[in-house]
């Protein structure tokens, strides 16, 4: 549970930005909080709110959520490899709800096998931070000066950098994967602009991780605990 | 009412994406390539999501670059997630005074 505190605090500030955005898109404070409580994901929610605001179709909503959140499938698959035997199906059904980028990052950094209680502790703190931050942002966001709320827009990305940098500094292979993914993402943004943002992220990530896996296959002890 | 339907669809898709691989995949993955791939994928996803989107996150390139620089320096030295994230916002905010 202790490991969840920085995540919860981080989410509190990141979801504040989501709350502001949701209200600006014409969604009520309650609606914004319900979206955060049922989805627990930053990029997917932001895209979802855009679709709601634009009055998009449900098919579009399904496709966008699939593409943006497909990375969770890869993370879930990766975590499924290091679950303790006490992780029975009901626990798997429940804990899978809380697989986010940051919870995945912290869980995969664990040396031991994952127990349900460990994941529940972390998820519950993250959940409270995420929903409370959304409600606060939605309720109070408009009262903040514009320069503060726009500066808050970088919080989520700052957190991503904090997850990437330490392993990239220690392992050349991770650094290479990170640089390929970034270069590919830049290419999609400025050159191959016909590809949507969600697909661009997926293609970039899969290509970079595949190159990393081909050039630098990991040894067992790095990948998981036996 | 329409909002409820949107939220329901959004939440169901997001949950299923996480739950199906987590709950129904119980075998050990033997392939060395695939296990290496799964090890690298989160870093690749986060990197692709961050670059170049971070430069558009504050509404001004200059403040975004200031925030990014602060985040990179602090993250390089392994500071906690929350410290790096809030320092990035603080740097972007302060840089805003100079433009």
Image (spheres, coloured by chain):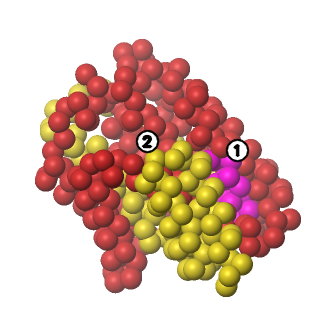
Looking at the rendering, the stretch of residues picked out in magenta corresponds to A10-22
On screen, A211 above or below A97?
Answer: below
- Badge 1 local density, few (<14 within 10 Å), some, or many (20+)? many
Quadrant location of residue B52? bottom left
**Residue A11 sits inside the magenta stretch:** yes
Residue A105, label in figure: 2
**Quadrant of the snapshot with the C terminus of chain A:** top left
Determine which quarter of the picture holds residue A197. Answer: bottom left
Q: Residue at x 60, y 75 (%)?
A: B63
When the figure is inspected, residue A154 is found, relative to residue A187, above or below; the finding is above
> How far apart are the alpha carbons under marks 2 and 1?
20 Å
Task: Tell me where residue A88 appears, x and y as whole percent.
Answer: 43, 18
Q: Please give left or right for residue A41 compared with residue B41 in the image.
A: right
Q: Give the main secondary structure of the magenta stretch.
A: helix
The residue at 50%/44% (across/down) is A102
Q: Which chain wears red?
A: A
């Amino acid at each position: 549970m202790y490991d969840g505190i920085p995540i919860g605090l981080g989410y509190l500030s990141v979801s504040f930005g989501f709350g502001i955005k949701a209200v600006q898109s014409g969604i009520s404070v309650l609606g914004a909080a319900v979206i955060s409580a049922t989805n627990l994901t930053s990029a997917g929610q932001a895209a979802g709110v855009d679709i709601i605001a634009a009055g998009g179709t449900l098919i579009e909503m399904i496709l966008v959520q699939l593409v943006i959140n497909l990375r969770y499938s890869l993370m879930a698959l990766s975590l499924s490899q290091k679950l303790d035997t006490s992780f029975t199906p009901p626990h798997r059904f429940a804990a899978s709800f809380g697989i986010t980028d940051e919870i995945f990052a912290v869980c995969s950094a664990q040396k031991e096998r994952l127990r349900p209680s460990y994941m529940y502790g972390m998820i519950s703190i993250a959940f409270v931070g995420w929903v409370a931050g959304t409600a606060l942002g939605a309720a109070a966001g408009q009262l903040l000066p514009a320069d503060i709320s726009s500066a808050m827009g970088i919080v989520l990305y700052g957190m991503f950098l904090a997850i990437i940098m330490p392993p990239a500094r220690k392992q050349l292979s991770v650094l290479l994967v990170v640089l390929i993914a970034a270069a590919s993402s830049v290419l999609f943004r400025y050159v191959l602009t016909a590809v949507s943002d969600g697909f661009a992220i997926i293609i970039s990530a899969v290509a970079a991780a595949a190159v990393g896996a081909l050039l630098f296959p990991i040894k067992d002890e790095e990948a998981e605990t036996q | 009412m329409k909002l409820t339907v949107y939220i329901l669809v959004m939440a169901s898709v997001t949950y299923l994406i996480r739950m199906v691989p987590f709950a129904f995949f119980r075998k050990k993955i033997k392939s060395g390539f695939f296990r290496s791939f799964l090890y690298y994928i989160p870093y690749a996803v986060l990197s692709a999501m961050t670059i170049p989107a971070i430069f558009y996150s504050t509404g001004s390139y200059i403040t975004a670059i200031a925030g990014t620089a602060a985040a990179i320096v602090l993250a390089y030295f392994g500071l906690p997630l929350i410290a790096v994230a809030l320092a990035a916002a603080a740097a972007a905010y302060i840089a805003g005074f100079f433009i």
